[in-house]
Amino acid sequence: MTEAGYNFGYLDENTKRMIRRALLQAVALPGYQVPFGSREMPLPYGWGTGGIQVTASIIGADDTLKVIDQGADDTTNAVSIRRFFNRVTGVATTDRTAEATIIQTRHRVPEMTLREGQVLVYQVPMPEPLFRLEPRVAETKRMHALADYGLMHVKLYEDIARHGAVTTSYNYPVLVNRRYLMSPSPIPAFDNPKLDRMPALQLFGAGREKRIYAVPPYTEVKSLDFEDHPFKPARADAACVICGSRASYLDELIVDDGGKRHFVCSDTDYCASRPPLQEAAE
Amino acid sequence: MISAGFADPAQDSQRSFRAVLEAISRPGRIFALPPLAEPPAPLRGALASVLLTLADADTPVWLDAAAPLDWLRFHCGCPVVAQPGAARFVVATGAMPALAGLARGTEEEPHLAATLLLQVASLRAGEGWRLTGPGIEREHRLAVAGLPADFLAQWAANAAGFPRGVDIVLCAGDSLACLPRTVRIEEAG
Ligand SMILES: [Zn+2]
């Protein structure tokens, strides 16, 4: 049951309809940013108001919601958003990636391969991938219209010339369905390959910038690169101290005053669902 | 007497929307909508539900039948326009209006395009066209009865204009399937 005084999903029906229309156009235009009339939400910008509005417009009584922030379900941001949806929809929530039908995320893609029937909703602070290179909105619109992304290629190539490699490790730009340049949101570049031909539907909401975009299932998502410098997602060369994984994305923890470092899986559900390391194996 | 709309607007429109969202995300796959008690003839359940879910005062609608106009105005409050080219939602229960005459957006704003809600005689999965493109792992098969003979030529022209173009929601009874402008359609071989 939802608390009295709220419409289901908090948003009024007019707002949901407007966002739903934008979502359908976004799916029909993979990677293209559809403007929408973003609403004030009872959480401040920076707390994922775009993602929240997308989730609020799609969620139904039969859904099971998971919310992660940097891969974890128990951070303040994730807990607040989960509580919010529990209050305004009454839907079931979960920490288990496999059980969720909607996963709202900030800064990570779950390690587990998502399946058909799941929807991944990204919170996006800045939807425009060309923003740092071209601040004029009219110019970026023109570039997207012409698929003129030379500016981004030049920027990446300058990186390679100066540092021997692309230094972008977060929010690494992708080309969707060979047409639109898209920001994957500030996920690590390590996660970029998971976007490619994912069986689940991916929706992106930017509240402050009032943009919605989407990647349909099984759609090509290619990280920009060069023949002589192919895209190489980076990962700390270490194993998780809890589960021993050498495949997952790791967070670095400083565990004592001497500066001793440990690495643990950023995706806490992935880590918890693996058998724990035997002490003897250490 | 205007027949009823959704019994529970918030829940019913959410269920219908998710079916449409899944359908446009997986082109050519057929999805059943919750049946509507009293769709206004000649609209059948799926088409009427899509209108209740998506149309409102911000979406000009063109309709090829006069009978449901009062129902549409009462439940959706949408402006009804005389030319299909001026509509956000183009509703056809009879002959399909030419795709080239509908709003297709601009190169810079391709989202300002019309969606054609087309009621057809039947939809069948597993036979007929071969569909490929975003949303489709390998191929989807879809057979549609009740389209104009030159539909595939019109569709090829529509798809060639990407990102400009019309998206189509094919409705039959309580079921629907979508053809977003990205989908490639080949005749059954
Ligand atoms: Zn681990």
Image: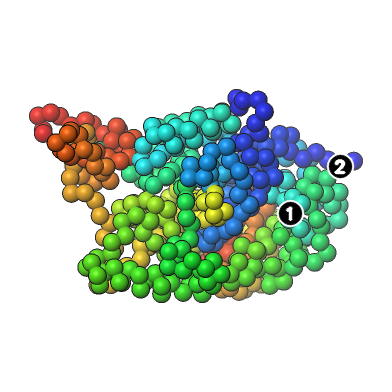
Residue pointed to by mark 1? B58
In the image, taking residue B91 as reference, residue A156 lies left or right, namely left
The C terminus of chain A, quarter of image: top left
Residue A110: which quarter of the image? Answer: top left
| Vertical placement of residue B86 versus A234, above or below | below
| Vertical placement of residue A247 versus B82, above or below | above
Number of callouts in the render?
2
The N terminus of chain A, quarter of image: top right
The residue tagged with tag 1: helix, strand or loop? loop
Q: Are marks 2 and 1 on the same chain?
A: yes
The answer for how far apart the CA atoms under marks 2 and 1 are is 22 Å
| Vertical placement of residue B10 versus A31, above or below | above
Indicate if the residue with disc 2 has its beta carbon within 8 Å of ligand 1. Answer: no
Determine the quadrant in which ligand 1 lies. top left
Label 1 neighbour load within 10 Å: few <14, some 14-19, many 20+: some
**Residue at 38% over, 32% down:** A74
Q: Position of residue B151 (x, y in %)?
A: 65, 69
Q: Residue furthest front?
A: A257
**Residue at 80% over, 48% down:** B77
Q: Earlier in the sequence, mark 2 or mark 1?
A: 2
Question: Do the residues under discs 2 and 1 have CB atoms within 8 angstroms?
Answer: no
Could you say which is closer to the camera, residue A203 or residue B151? A203
Q: Position of residue B47 (x, y in %)?
A: 71, 50
